[in-house]
């Protein structure tokens, strides 16, 4: 078991959350609490970097869906970056690859954001 760490920073388009370690039943509340504290605005993008994720169970998937809902409620969008292949496979199986925009890196996800007109 690898403890989850999260790093939140601000990018020009909105917030970036980098997750490292295990995203599971024990750590999902930590991510959910961090999401509740984010101040997202319409037109912004929330980027969740998953490149250092070592494990993700159904609780982790649920918290990523909660992150999407939080962003949408704020009028923002969400993109996942550096999704590990084992998580990408789960997303394909359950259809979440059609729900989340994904990018190879956090930098590409933040660069793909365009300010609202």
Image (spheres, rainbow, N blue to C red):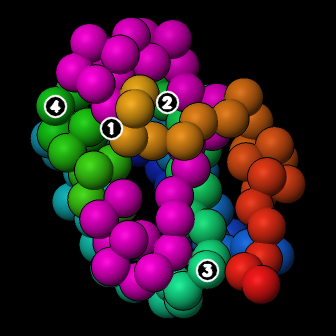
Q: CA distance from mark 3 to mark 2?
A: 27 Å
Relative vertical location of residue 111 with respect to residue 19 in this rendering, above or below: below
Q: Nearer the viewer, mark 1 or mark 3?
A: 3
Sequence-wise, the earlier of marks 1 and 2 is 1
The answer to whether residue 111 shows anywhere in this view is yes
Residue in the picture at 79% in, 52% down: 112
Label 3 CA crowd tier, 10 Å (few <14, some 14–19, many 20+): some
Q: CA distance from mark 4 to mark 2?
A: 14 Å
Q: CA distance from mark 1 to mark 3?
A: 27 Å
Residue behind mark 3:
43
| Range of residues picked out in magenta | 68-96
Left or right: residue 65 compared with residue 46 = left
Residue behind mark 2:
53
Residue behind mark 1:
23
Sequence-wise, the earlier of marks 4 and 3 is 3
State which quadrant residue 17 falls in.
bottom right
Sequence-wise, the earlier of marks 3 and 2 is 3
Sequence-wise, the earlier of marks 4 and 1 is 1
Label 4 CA crowd tier, 10 Å (few <14, some 14–19, many 20+): few
Q: Position of residue 92 (x, y in %)?
A: 35, 16
Residue in the picture at 32% in, 31% down: 96
Is-magenta flag for residue 69? yes
Is-magenta flag for residue 55? no
């Amino acid at each position: 078991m690898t403890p989850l760490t999260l790093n939140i920073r601000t990018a020009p388009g909105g917030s970036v959350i980098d997750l490292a370690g295990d995203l599971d039943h024990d750590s999902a509340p930590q991510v959910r609490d961090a999401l509740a504290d984010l101040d997202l605005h319409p037109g912004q993008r929330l980027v969740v970097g998953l490149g250092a994720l070592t494990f993700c169970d159904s609780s982790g998937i649920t918290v990523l869906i909660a992150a999407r809902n939080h962003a949408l409620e704020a009028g923002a969008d969400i993109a996942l970056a550096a999704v590990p292949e084992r998580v990408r496979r789960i997303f394909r199986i359950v259809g979440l690859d059609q729900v989340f925009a994904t990018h190879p890196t956090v930098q590409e996800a933040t660069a793909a954001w365009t300010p609202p007109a």
